[in-house]
Image (cartoon, rainbow, N blue to C red):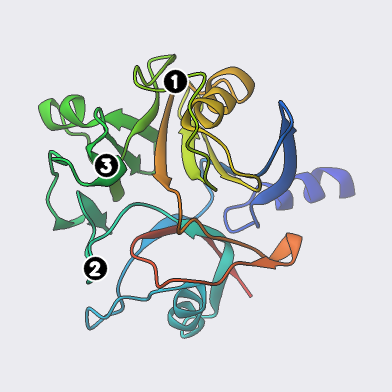
Amino acid sequence: MIRVLLALFLILPGAASACEALTYKSNDYTLCKVSLGEDLRLFHSDAVGTPLANFNGINKALANENWELGFAMNAGMYHPDRTPVGLFIDHGTEMTPIADGGTYGNFGLKPNGVFCINKHQYSVIETNAFRADPPYCKFATQSGPMLVIDGKLHPRFLLNATSHYIRNGVGVSADGTEAFFVISDTRVTFHEFGSLFRDHLKTPNALYFDGKVSRLYAPDLNRHDKGFPLGAMVGTVIRY
């Protein structure tokens, strides 16, 4: 009976997400897995519209209701005023509209896509497919490029690319019940990063969040990255 109760406790919503070190093909990463039923949210601004800017800002806002972050990372590109470049949905309300992306940095390396959260599944959806048949998203963030599209790497990722950066992104399991958030701890190419999602994590679709400003908050690993103010962020919420 004790073992059964312990098992039930471990899967109750609000349990801290599991973050772990991962080495794949000589590159180091940190992986945080989130299962459906955990309280996964996107964050951008406080109640009066001021950008939260960093993980401390989120924790300060959550503390009013005795909540805190289980883990978090940046979750999409943003303009100089920290407004999301593309679609951002917060608690079912569209804060910024879906965008083509133009030539705005890596966002413009099309196709880009949307990460969508609802109580039934997590999903990563290519932008045109999302626009054609938009699902309900309690939370959503648009970013780019897509890393993996229906099991294939983005067509412009080159095996011999010379652009290496710290990068972060998200992939979703085929059944939509798990989201895999990854940040590289060594500088990697797009091809290396996308291959991790496709070949190791087996995610049929994955989305790039950012590069130079990539940050992670993982208290179970004693990690709290600081740096430039951020725009959209994603993380799990747990009780004190």
From the top left corner, tell me how far across and down residue 176 is, in percent.
Answer: 45, 29
Q: Earlier in the sequence, mark 2 or mark 3?
A: 2
- Amino acid type of the residue tagged 1 in the rendering: Leu
Decide which of 175, 11 is in the foreground and name it.
Answer: 175
What residue is shown at x 34% (from left), y 60% (from top)?
A: 232
According to the image, label 1 marks what residue? 158
CA separation, marks 3 and 1? 17 Å
In depth, the one of 219 and 225 nearer the eye is 225
Examine the rendering and report whether any part of residue 55 can be seen: yes
Q: Residue furthest front?
A: 162
Mark 1 burial class by Cα count in 10 Å: few <14, some 14-19, many 20+: some
Q: Secondary structure at mark 3?
A: helix
The CA span between labels 1 and 2 is 29 Å
Task: Name the residue that disc number 3 marks.
Answer: 107
Look at label 2 and name its amino acid: Pro
Numbered label attached to residue 80: 2
Q: Position of residue 80 (x, y in %)?
A: 24, 68
Element at label 2: loop
- The amino acid pointed to by label 3 is Phe
The residue at 55%/23% (across/down) is 195
In percent of width and height, residue 203 lies at: 51, 23
Distance between the Cα atoms at labels 2 and 3?
15 Å
Question: In the displayed structure, would residue 106 be above or below residue 82?
Answer: above
Front position among marks 1 and 2:
1
